[in-house]
Image (cartoon, helix red, strand yellow):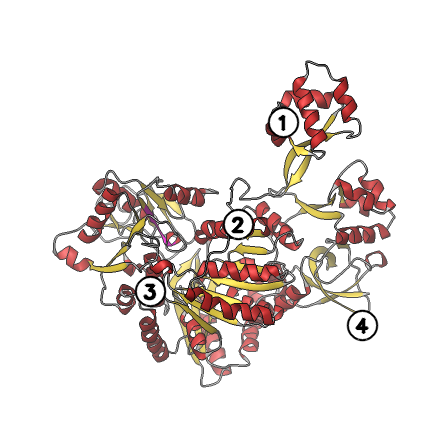
């Protein structure tokens, strides 16, 4: 038997399938989608079995050394998806497949075989039963150390039958979570042991009586509470040989201490009912269709998601729900946990590596039916997907910026096509590309343009900060915003203040010579952080002490320019001394669980003002928020990115939607120095359609998406002359190779020309149809393969990039 393996050696020369011979004792075990250890040159490397064959062009094949899995970690569908990803994202095969697995499976680990339940022991064949008679877990190496090769095949069958489970104990920080459990050594002798106890040992009797009613093992902590006993009592029973104690693994559950109150489906509004019927029809007919739900903030999209999933679960199928970032997860997870309970798994970046691994195992073993998570959750190893939902589909975080540079929406379309199931894209501010496709009929457009329960959208006031300055107001708060904040404090209502900058100030400048403190490794100014009294680079992590005098002219006249969240918090304390403020940004939410803790405090009314960056702009739904203040609406508007106006409109609309979502009416104050800009003007009237039409006209004139596709080739090198020379050659080659209808721009320096001591140049390709583009781009990489492998040169290709910084 011959298998074709992708090896974990991510270079251009090894980006193909390699043939290996399967030894006789592994032939009954090995399957496509399993991880294996294979000899590769002088070393041993990990790889994935992609397929099997009976023919090969190689005269002498090497043997597979070891099979790491008992059941495949990649399904046939995920193997096919990885092959597609290799071409669509221009990445190595091994990179595509590794992106689908949790980090724990890429680390060094020990493999263990565990008895699923004590009752399963009698179901095992004799050859296996003897291994588990006196223990629940056996190291994989122990089985390999025997001469009984068919034993591995028996283990595989027992895993398939559910009697055994293979688990991976990671050797580094990722380990299994263990708890102490106790159980009677002999259930048959309990009644006799109860009678033999000393009459004064009442506490010990209580424990034995508990086990007579509940003949199962239980954690020590739970038993102490339920049997009203103590640790010393349990130790006495253990010393007498009545009870035994052992450590057992429990799955890490990030929501273990949370109580989720069961909810039932709500009565749908007429609008919700009209939207959900076409989705039901797609589910019933078992056909793929992509729906765009364009629904204003607070229109009840989540309830449509929940009831669509319930329909899928009734048919025994599974659901994937993507949310754009951590900010949406706590409240969104709560909605799903309350509706579907233990059927929900969570996958997002705030989980520890161990928690992610345990959640992935639940999915892989079929213990859950719904996954709620960020971008990478799109690769959840379900085998019978019935619906995929992408909430806030316009978010840039759905596009991965590192290899493999995929967009979750594209992967979702591919998977939904495979399973012939509906894909729902939901947003109050859909991306121009998505909305344009819905208008052309590529996606089906479903609209929810009113809030539920006749709740009105908030009124929006745009304040021209130039006029505030003329009138003598040099504060960061306009008179209108300050007045409305004061009103909310007096009425006991809550406010949200949004600023898209963290830190204390955006840069530090000498007032005498104009010198701005720069990062020594990147062409970007340093940001001042008040709490650490230091200057930080948000690109490479460089940090230095705040200087006492200018390093250029020795002047002591150093001033902070711009305002970050820390400075705003300080200013609120001065002008509204009675206000209780919670600040939410990357700095305050760095610790595990801090994000959810801060939101819980705000939801419980322990603060009057929630101040934060982008993470508070979406997904928050608190009944007492009646005011939203946007402190600097221009912060994203003038970035060198053709999507800057679109992102500004989306962000302002989303953050405005946090106000007045329930019975109390909402107000929004947007502070700006460019009130005449159309992206701000259209937010005033919540007018997405007018914004869409205006922006589409500009995109057409400038040959940008959705009228053209774009690809960016970025080159970086420690030497600036080298990076200019190579980018120039690449640009010329691409220009010669493509048709005249395509537009090739560059070479030009990136908007931040240097990061981490590497100079960065790029060229951009705009095209409508270039069938040979992928091959041309592969040739670019091939031409510079030797220099790339040496490490100095980096050439990255991003097809349909979302960020051009």
Residue 197 on image: x %, y %: 74, 17
Q: CA distance from mark 1 to mark 4?
A: 66 Å
Q: CA distance from mark 2 to mark 4?
A: 50 Å
- Give the quarter of the image for residue 246: top right
Please tell me which residue is depicted at 50% across the width and 45% down the height of the picture: 261
Q: Tell me: 538 left or right of 369.
A: left
Q: Position of residue 180 (x, y in %)?
A: 65, 32
Is residue 151 visible from the viewing direction of this image? yes
Nearer to us in this view, 406 or 200 = 200
Which label sits on residue 337? 2
User: Which numbered disc, 2 or 1, marks the residue that appears first in the sequence?
Assistant: 1
- The N terminus lies in which quarter of the figure? bottom right
Query: Label 3 vs label 4: CA separation?
Result: 58 Å
Quadrant of res 414: bottom right
Mark toward the start of the polypeptide (2 vs 4): 4
Main SS of residues in magenta: strand
Q: Quadrant of the C terminus?
A: bottom left
Q: Nearer the viewer, mark 3 or mark 2?
A: 2
Marker disc for residue 649:
3
Local secondary structure at mark 3: helix
Is 590 in the magenta?
no
Decide: marks 1, 4 in contact (CB < 8 A)?
no
Is residue 611 on the magenta stretch? Answer: yes
Judging by the rendered image, the residue that carries numbered circle 1 is: 227
Q: CA distance from mark 3 to mark 2?
A: 32 Å
Mark 1 surroundings: few (<14), some (14-19) or many (≥20) residues within 10 A: some
Q: Which mark is residue 55?
A: 4
Q: Which residues, given as a range, are shown in magenta?
A: 610-614
């Amino acid at each position: 038997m011959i298998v074709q393996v992708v090896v974990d050696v991510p270079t251009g020369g090894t980006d193909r399938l390699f043939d290996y011979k399967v030894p006789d004792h592994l032939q009954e075990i090995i399957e496509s989608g399993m991880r294996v250890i294979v000899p590769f040159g002088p070393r041993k490397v990990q790889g994935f079995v992609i397929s099997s064959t009976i023919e090969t062009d190689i005269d002498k094949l090497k043997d597979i050394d070891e099979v790491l899995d008992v059941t495949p970690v990649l399904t046939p569908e995920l193997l096919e998806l990885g092959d597609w990803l290799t071409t669509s994202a221009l990445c190595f095969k091994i990179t595509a497949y590794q992106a689908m697995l949790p980090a724990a499976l890429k680390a060094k680990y020990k493999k263990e075989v565990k008895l699923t339940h004590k009752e399963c022991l009698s179901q095992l064949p004799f050859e296996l039963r003897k291994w588990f008679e006196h223990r629940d877990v056996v190291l994989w190496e122990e089985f390999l150390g025997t001469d009984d090769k068919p034993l591995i095949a028996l283990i595989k069958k027992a895993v398939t039958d559910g009697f055994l489970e293979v688990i991976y104990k990671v050797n580094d920080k990722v380990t299994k979570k263990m708890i102490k459990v106790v159980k009677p050594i002999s259930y048959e002798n309990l009644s006799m042991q109860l009678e033999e106890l000393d009459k004064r040992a009442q506490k010990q009797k209580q424990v034995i009586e508990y086990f007579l009613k509940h003949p199962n093992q239980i954690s020590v902590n739970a038993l102490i509470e339920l049997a009203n006993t103590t640790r010393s009592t349990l130790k006495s029973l253990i010393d007498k040989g009545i009870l035994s104690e052992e450590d057992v693994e429990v799955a890490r559950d990030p929501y273990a201490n949370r109580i989720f109150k069961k909810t039932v489906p709500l009565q749908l509004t007429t609008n919700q009912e009209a939207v959900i019927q076409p989705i039901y029809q797609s589910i019933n007919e078992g056909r793929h269709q992509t729906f765009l739900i364009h629904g204003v903030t607070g229109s009840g999209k989540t309830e449509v998601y929940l009831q669509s999933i319930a329909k899928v679960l009734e048919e025994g199928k599974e659901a994937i729900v993507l949310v754009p970032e951590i900010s949406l997860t706590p409240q969104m997870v709560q909605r799903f946990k309350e509706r579907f309970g233990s059927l929900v798994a969570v996958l997002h970046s705030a989980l520890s590596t161990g928690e992610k691994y345990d959640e992935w195992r639940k999915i892989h073993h079929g213990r859950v039916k719904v996954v709620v998570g960020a971008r990478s959750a799109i690769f959840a190893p379900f085998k019978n997907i019935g619906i995929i939902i992408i909430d806030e589909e316009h978010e840039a975080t759905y596009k991965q910026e590192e290899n493999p540079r995929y967009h979750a929406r594209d992967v979702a379309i591919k998977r939904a096509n495979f399973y012939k199931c509906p894909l729902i894209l939901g947003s109050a501010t859909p991306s121009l590309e998505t909305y344009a496709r819905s208008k052309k009929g590529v996606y089906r457009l479903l609209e929810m343009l009113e809030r539920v329960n006749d709740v009105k959208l908030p009124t929006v006031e745009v304040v021209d900060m130039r006029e505030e300055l003329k009138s003598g107001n040099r504060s960061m708060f306009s008179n209108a915003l300050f007045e409305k904040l004061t009103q909310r404090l007096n009425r006991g209502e809550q406010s949200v203040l949004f600023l898209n900058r963290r830190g204390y100030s955006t840069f530090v400048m000498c007032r005498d010579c104009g010198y701005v403190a720069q990062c020594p490794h990147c062409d970007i100014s340093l940001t001042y952080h008040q709490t650490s009294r230091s200057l930080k680079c948000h690109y490479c992590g460089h940090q230095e002490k705040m200087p006492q005098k200018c390093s250029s002219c020795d002047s002591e006249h150093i001033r902070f320019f711009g305002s970050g969240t820390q400075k705003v918090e300080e200013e609120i304390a001065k002008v509204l001394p009675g206000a209780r403020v919670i600040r939410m940004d990357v700095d305050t939410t760095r610790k595990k669980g801090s994000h959810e803790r801060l939101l819980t405090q705000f939801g419980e009314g322990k603060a009057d003002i929630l101040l934060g960056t982008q993470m508070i702009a979406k997904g928050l739904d608190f009944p007492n928020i009646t005011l939203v203040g946007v402190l600097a609406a221009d912060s994203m508007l003038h970035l060198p990115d053709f999507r800057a106006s679109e992102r500004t409109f989306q962000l302002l609309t989303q953050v405005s939607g946090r106000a007045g979502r329930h019975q109390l009416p909402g107000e929004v104050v947007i502070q700006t120095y460019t009130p005449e800009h159309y992206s701000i003007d259209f937010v005033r009237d919540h007018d997405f359609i007018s914004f869409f039409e205006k922006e589409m006209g500009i995109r057409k004139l400038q040959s940008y998406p959705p009228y053209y596709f774009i690809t960016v080739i970025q080159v970086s090198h420690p030497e600036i002359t080298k990076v200019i020379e190579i980018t120039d050659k690449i640009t010329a080659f691409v220009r010669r190779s493509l048709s005249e209808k395509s537009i090739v721009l560059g070479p030009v320096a990136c908007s931040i020309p240097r990061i981490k001591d590497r100079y960065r140049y790029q060229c951009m390709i705009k095209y409508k149809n270039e069938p040979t583009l992928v091959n041309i781009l592969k040739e670019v990489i091939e031409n510079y393969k030797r220099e790339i492998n040496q490490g100095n040169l980096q050439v990255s290709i991003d097809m349909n990039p979302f960020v051009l910084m």
